[in-house]
Image: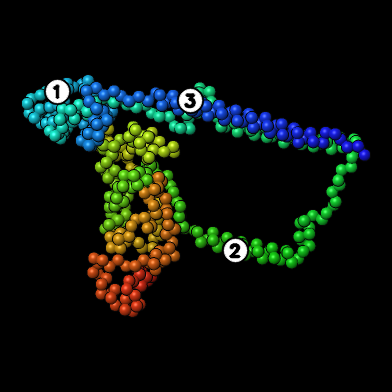
Amino acid sequence: MKQGKNLNSASRFSLITLALLLSFSSFLFAQEDTTATADTAGAAESETSPAAQGGDAAAGKALFNANCAACHKLYDRATGPALYNVTERRDREWLYRWIKNNKELRDSGDAEAIAIYNEYNQTAMNAFPQLSNADIDDILAYTNTPKPEPVAPAEQAGGGGGSGGGVSSTVILGILAIVLVMLVAVLFLVNNTLRKFAVAQGVELPVKESRKPIWKAFVENQFLVLVSVIVLLLGGAYFAYGWMMQIGVDQGYEPIQPIHYSHRIHAGENQIECKYCHSSARTSKHSGIPSLNVCMNCHKSISEVADATSEYSSVTEDYSKEFYDKEIQKLYKAVGWDQTTQSYTGETQAVEWVRIHNLPDFAYFNHSQHVSVADIQCQTCHGPVEEMEIMYQYAPLTMGWCINCHRETNVKMDGNPYYEKIHEELSKKYGVEELTAAQMGGLECGKCHY
């Protein structure tokens, strides 16, 4: 019989197509990398440091942060006025006198000093006689720093759909998908053509032997059917039991709150003590939801994320500076804070926070007993809150979880004379030096259920 001469044509065609595909994709990626590199270089060239006139702006920044930042911002009004380009609005000699001792300047009858004092609700500015004229020149040089332009997110630097001329990864993936579909279609057509060519040339093709379907062979094997049924029943019972045991367990619950609050920034980067906001955890059954006035203790002066976003790890791709600034404005709207006049308007709005940790009514838990008496850290139950951007339920908070903790945790005796007598008696009974909460009666039903 005759055999065809072009049996390997499909393989040759596949190799040629694959080579073209790789060449095309390499060209596109190289073009994208070149564009990204050019954009990065252009961005680097566009960064210019402001020229400080009459002082050192770098030294002035350090002095500003140490002495002025509590009440002033460069570009927005705070407790005091915005200081950007203050040298264009005030005479330098006048600024020397005002910064060193503004009260003395007001007492001298200076009209500008008195007007500023009255405009800002007669809030007296601190005197800084320790600052020399050279120090003040450095601070004034820093106040002349132009506001930096917002930096475009990294994912937009390649110019995916803009005028940069780069090719986005979405387009590349689309082209690759189309080429792959075309390759599959061509292989299918080549296979059919070869079969027809073989039949025309009298080449015998292998014939598949008819076999019994696998499902029919399975049904006829009674032992295999019995074992399969038993496995399915046991597996179904196992998963059903596991599913039912999760009813009422909200571990991992992570709701979106009406005002975004980042524990990662506040408790983590700024290292704010948990009980500064949740103060009632020391003395009450509940940890409590902090009042918005607690937030305003800091946010009267913090109305936005710092402009030098690259210096702060708090700003990420998912949570940008603009995102955090909008959430602070939501806080201002809720408490009725007018940023322009630095005063409360009296128009407040209730914030409907979504509760995360919620024990059933028949379970009693006292925060003060655990936090103040037992000296247990918040992270023991609530997890690494200092790393959480969005707060979620870390522990299962089930009965078994609580009982296991009571069995493993020793009672804190240092500075706690309440337990001394009972500790001495129970230590002899159990033959141990330290007692766990369970040995002190922590497993009695009435301790948690009433």
Q: CA distance from mark 2 to mark 3?
A: 61 Å
Callout 1 amino acid: Glu
Coordinates of residue 121 in the picture (x, y in percent): 17, 32
Callout 2 amino acid: Ala
Could you say which is closer to the camera, residue 343 or residue 96? 96
Q: Residue at x 22, y 25 (%)?
A: 55
Q: Secondary structure at mark 2?
A: helix
- Label located before the other in sequence (1 or 3): 3
Q: Is residue 440 above or below residue 117?
A: below
- Residue 412 placement, left or right of 68: right
Coordinates of residue 184 in the picture (x, y in percent): 72, 36
- Residue 205 placement, left or right of 69: right
> Would you name the residue on which mark 3 appears?
38
Coordinates of residue 125 in the picture (x, y in percent): 16, 33
- Label located before the other in sequence (2 or 1): 1
> Would you name the residue on which mark 2 appears?
237
The mark closer to the camera, 2 or 3, is: 3
Could you say which is closer to the camera, residue 378 or residue 355? 378
Q: Secondary structure at mark 3?
A: helix
Residue 57 quadrant: top left
Farthest residue toward the right? 1
Q: Quadrant of the C terminus?
A: bottom left
Q: Is residue 55 above or below residue 2?
A: above
Q: CA distance from mark 2 to mark 1?
A: 86 Å
- Residue 174 placement, left or right of 96: right
Q: Secondary structure at mark 1?
A: helix
The mark closer to the camera, 2 or 1, is: 1
Please tell me the numbered disc located at residue 93. 1
Callout 3 amino acid: Ala
Q: State yes or no: discs 2 and 3 in contact (Cβ < 8 Å).
A: no
Residue 377 quadrant: bottom left
Coordinates of residue 82 in the picture (x, y in percent): 24, 28
